[in-house]
Image (spheres, rainbow, N blue to C red):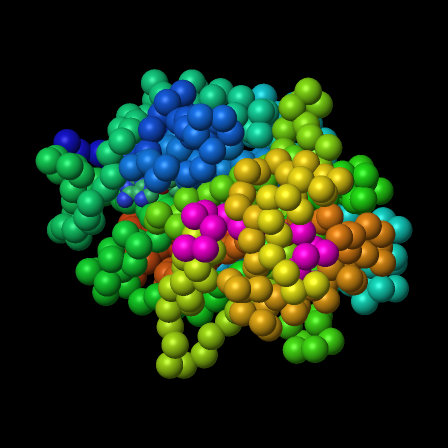
Amino acid sequence: MKYDVIIIGAGPGGIFAAYELMQRKPGLKVAVFEAGHALNRRHCPIDGEKIKTCIGCKSCSIMSGFGGAGAFSDGKYNITNDFGGTLYEYIGRKQALDLMRYVDEINLKYGGEGTKLYSTAGTRFKRLCIQNDLHLLDASVRHLGTDINYVVLENLYNDLKDKVEFFFDTPAQSIEVTEDGYLIRCAGAEYTCEKCIVSVGRSGSKWMEQVCKELGIPTKSNRVDIGVRVELPAVVFSHLTDELYESKIVYRTKQYGDNVRTFCMNPKGAVVTENTNGIITVNGHSYEDPAKQTENTNFALLVAKHFSEPFKDSNGYGESIARLSNMLGGGVIVQRFGDLIRGRRSTPSRMNDAFITPTLNATPGDLSLVLPKRILDGIIEMIYALDKVAPGTANDDTLLYGVEVKFYNMEVEVNEKLESRYRGLYIIGDGSGITHSLSHASASGVHVARDIAK
Ligand SMILES: Cc1cc2nc3c(=O)[nH]c(=O)nc-3n(C[C@H](O)[C@H](O)[C@H](O)COP(=O)(O)OP(=O)(O)OC[C@H]3O[C@@H](n4cnc5c(N)ncnc54)[C@H](O)[C@@H]3O)c2cc1C
């Protein structure tokens, strides 16, 4: 089976590459191979009643399938070069922002119309933060919400399905370089193409590593972000979230000089588990529909850990810490801030006494047995700093879920076209290590599609 272009992975990177190819060269024969299910078959079995924690499905519906890791996410498209990836280093700042705006337009066209675009530029909070040694980063953020994000994906799929061939539940096993392109092997079948776009995201990181090794594509890896997800009554952060929705705030700790940052803020949202290669970590999302909103807001506090020689396995380090929490708690551990600073574990009865209802059923425990001291000290310092701009953050009943880990794929060597050392083999999205967000991953897909169409 012969194609002009094969796209591996149907996350935002792959979808937007397919979309743009069909806009610019509708005559191209394009196939998309996706390890996970079609969108309508994606379903996480955790229902909070019969199944309360992750049961380790063969294909995790949170991370895999049409829509990729972002399908049930909060659908926050941050239009900025300040965070979410380093795409601008490859394609230029202006081009990166233009592509992110273009992606935003498509999202609006496919069902996101009417959703709100928030901006931190010129707000009074910048001053309030800096007066308290906190730094609010600049961004515009389109909040689609989990529900509208799904509608947009559904509409995109309905538009693409007759123009592009989708193969679901079909993980690519290998990529071989041939004389006139590439040979892709999937379970029991072989497919050839002239150009190949690899967009396998975080869930495909191990496979990506293997492909790079086999094809001799240089990579580097030295970063992992480790921390907790904070959950508190929505009213504590409402002055910030009502105006900005998401605030990316950075704090440099006095004790170690480490940067701690807020990440993925979900006003009136829910805390959820995430399964990466069998390891259970924590994440969060929220709905645009008021009927589905909760009384709590959640966000992550993360500390970036960069390693230098000789240690190279930063993701392995993050995994080991996550495994510790899985070992002690059978999954995610939750602890009240008051218990943490008093040096005692949270117990079911202490949790019952709390004036907050957790949105995730996690095991009450002690995060100080899991997180390295330096990271935990940084998080505690940041909570007290945030308490000055959002009083109540350091209340005893503030919940900390652990651990949240942001794994970074190793960075793959590509040029300004996001093309590897092989002509016509493009590596994009989170799988390339260059992007870490919906908007950057989507923009990288549009970028390579335009190059191919040219
Ligand atoms: C719960 C959650 C919430 C999030 N919230 C946000 C948010 O609000 N805003 C934001 O900017 N980012 C968010 N993110 C991150 C965001 O989802 C990712 O940055 C984005 O999806 C990356 O897109 P991608 O296309 O590069 O990879 P992915 O979305 O990971 O897609 C890659 C796809 O490739 C498939 N694949 C892997 N290996 C193979 C293989 N060998 N063969 C075939 N297919 C394969 C996978 O199944 C997957 O579907 C969130 C992530 C999670 C998990």
- Please identify the residue farthest to the left as the structure is shown: 188
Q: Find residue 159 and report its horizontal and vertical position in percent.
A: 43, 20
The image quarter in which residue 111 lies: top right
Tell me if residue 316 is in the magenta stretch: no
Q: Where are the magenta residues, as a range?
A: 327-341
Q: Find residue 34 and report its horizontal and vertical position in percent.
A: 31, 35
Taking the image as shown, residue 418 lies to the left or right of residue 283, namely left
Tell me if residue 333 is in the magenta stretch: yes
Q: Find residue 145 and report its horizontal and vertical position in percent.
A: 62, 30
- Please identify the residue farthest to the front as the structure is shown: 349
Q: Residue at x 49, y 59 (%)?
A: 90
Q: Residue at x 35, y 66 (%)?
A: 219
Q: Is residue 176 above or below residue 220?
A: above
Of residue 273 and residue 351, the one placed in the foreground of this image is 351
Residue 198 seen: yes
Of residue 301 and residue 138, the one placed in the foreground of this image is 301
Q: Is residue 213 above or below residue 29?
A: below
